[in-house]
Amino acid sequence: MGSAIFKNPKYPVPKNEKERVKALKSYGVLDTQPEEDFDAITRLAARISHSPIALISLIDEARQWFKSKVGLEIQETPREISFCQYAIMQDDVYEVCDALKDPRFTENPLVTGKPDIRFYAGAPLIDEDGYHLGTLCVIDTEPKALSKEQKEIMQLLAKTTVDHLQLKKRNKELDASRNVLQKFFDLSLDFMCIANVQGYFLKISSAFTSVLGYAESELLGKPFLEFVHPEDIQITLTEIEKLAQGKLTIQFENRYRKADGNYIWLSWNTKPDTQTGILYATARNITEHKMAEDLFKKNTLLQKEKEIAERSSKLKEQFLANMSHEMRTPLNSIIGLSNLLLKKTDLKGKELEYLQSIQLNSKNLFGLVNNILDFAKIETSKFELEKIKFNLKEIVLDAVHAIKNTAEEKGLVLNSLIDERIPEEVVGDPARLIQALVNLLSNGIKYTLNGEVTISLEMVTVDAQSVMVKFIVADTGPGIPADKIDEIFHPFKQVNNSFTRSDGGTGLGLTITKKLVSLYGGEIKVHSIEGKGSMFYFTLIFPVAEQTISVNVKETFVDSSAIRGLTVLLVEDNPFNQMVAIDTLKDWNPSHDIDVAENGEVAIEKLKQKRYDLILMDIQMPIMDGHTAAQKIRNELPPPICNTPIIAMTAHASVNEIEGCFKDGMNDYITKPFDVKDLIGKIGRVLFHKAGSAS
Ligand code: ADP
């Protein structure tokens, strides 16, 4: 219908019709409810023009629609029968004084029928962009004309109507944009707030209440500094102070207290209104970021500390290995040579005493070196227990055996009482257990002048998986004063100096023993009565070794007389150690044929020339060390040379060092200065094992 009108030249259409209709629609007034503002205008228009009908008529593509009406029932009419379509074509008041005399309207149904229009006057509603939106018009059923003054008033009222329309439109736009802002404010995950110079929030976004967990009234009712972490109040004040000094924006971080008492980290961005001092601020919750940052910092620090600790531990380990070698090598020679000398010569009187003194003191010194090394290892936490199968009863007998001679020399009785119910095969570190037991037994012997020293093993509980054993070492010595008992486990603490001076103690034995026992998961305790004796005891749990895979240790012992004269390659750089090793082997069996190589390189050459039953390999040597030599023998020499058994001779029996020896393909290791029985046992075992594996 609308398009028919525009095409029909009979009806007037403004030049900018399309834009005009668009502009009209932008007011959002068409088809809305009546409003008093507009009705007041139409009432006034009817009154001043003495007309029964007054309308605010808005013209869209097809119709005239009445926003306000006086004296008329209908809400709209088709545009083509409207008088207003003519009125919007001009800028001033359009007047039809008698419709029956105007050929454009004589046939008009609004003239021929209801409401029987005879008179029409319409002032166009022209908005600020010049669009003619409609009219404010008055209608009468009698012909008449408006005075000039009435027309002027009509134009003024039309202008007021447009002002109202424009104001309402602007308000609507403002509301819409305010809604968008409010939504933005409400939906934002960031914190948004407006605060006054007195330090109170005036407005806060919902992130404040939802994240912090307070009601809005709680947050608005207190100065915001009350929620700031006490440590961050100063930085917050300092930053706000900067605004007072003219800074335009501030960025800083602080912690805010939540309702549950925890704090979150906020990163603030604040701008003041320079006139009112009111602060507009946004903040982002950076707690997770801060935590990640803290974790990263901590981890980096820990990693650095770990690296430093590992590096220094490695350096210490290296230093210990070197020290151990440097100190034990000459001691090894002294002890070995004095042993040989004692056996070979028929020294008597003072000379014999001197030699025995040399031997005793060098042994003490050796013990001291070992203790200091063990203690240092404990300090560097390099002390780890092995988990191998061993025979518990044999270990105890070995420990007793190790100090038997000393006890006999002092005329002391040495007892061992082992509960028969204790399973023989258990899992643990036999070497470290012996070390602990020998430490306690030798203390017992060292401090007891007469009487006896007893080691007892009592079974506490047992099941298929484990056994709990109580170890007790008791003596009839001087005892330890009650107030000194705690002290004796501290390094270098000796409660009776006169004893220790003559007995060459270091004050480290019990510290090491305590650590060994604790590595096993136990705790060493002491019960002592001065003048009567002391009793050291601890309880350990050992996993019981599975019977099916248990090995009878005794089977691995070899009768030394069964070993014929061996062809041995001794790889050792130190001439004194060479002498000790050769003489010890010859002392055991003079028919052993021993060749010496002063380093790994010479050893390999010799192995190419001659077959050997056994290689005794020192580890630290110039030109080519024992590790490299063993690897070359195993990997580069042809069979059967590459299968020659190798026993490492190490001055420093650390777990790493021993692991290294086995990794290089060596069959066993022995710590210098070696005990001849130990050496024979190990030689027997490697030869026996070799024969066993070959069969
Ligand atoms: P030391 O090398 O001096 O024996 P320990 O750490 O083994 O070092 O012992 C620390 C101190 O505890 C000893 O100096 C000694 O005074 C005291 N002590 C240890 N065992 C006994 C014991 N069985 N009887 C009396 N005193 C002992």
Image (spheres, rainbow, N blue to C red):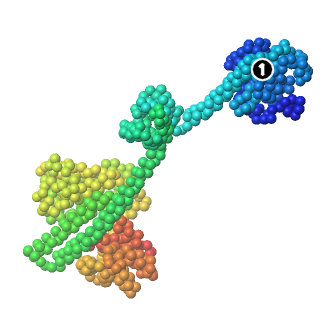
Measuring from the top left, give residue 579's x and y in whole percent: 24, 80
Location of residue 188 with respect to 624 vertically, above or below: above
Q: Quadrant of residue 602?
A: bottom left
Measuring from the top left, give residue 25's x and y in whole percent: 74, 30
Residue at 16% from the left image edge and 47% from the top image edge: 483
How many discs mark residues in the rendered view?
1
Q: Nearer the viewer, residue 223 or 168?
A: 168
Residue at 86% from the left image edge and 29% from the top image edge: 11
Where is the C terminus found, in terms of image quarters?
bottom left
Q: Nearer the viewer, residue 150 or 623?
A: 150
Query: Which element is circle 1 on?
Result: strand
Check disc 1 and give the amino acid type: Cys
Location of residue 178 with respect to 345 vertically, above or below: above
Residue at 18% from the left image edge and 75% from the top image edge: 338
Is residue 76 among the parts visible in the rendering?
no
Horizontal side of 199 relative to 518 (left or right) equals: right
Residue at 41% from the left image edge and 37% from the top image edge: 244
Q: Nearer the viewer, residue 607 or 268?
A: 268
Horizontal side of 49 relative to 310 (left or right) equals: right
Q: Which residue is mark 1?
A: 137
Measuring from the top left, give residue 475's x and y in whole percent: 18, 54
Q: Is mark 1 within 8 Å of ligand 1?
A: no
Horizontal side of 434 relative to 118 (left or right) equals: left
Q: Quadrant of residue 660?
A: bottom left
Measuring from the top left, give residue 132's x and y in whole percent: 76, 29
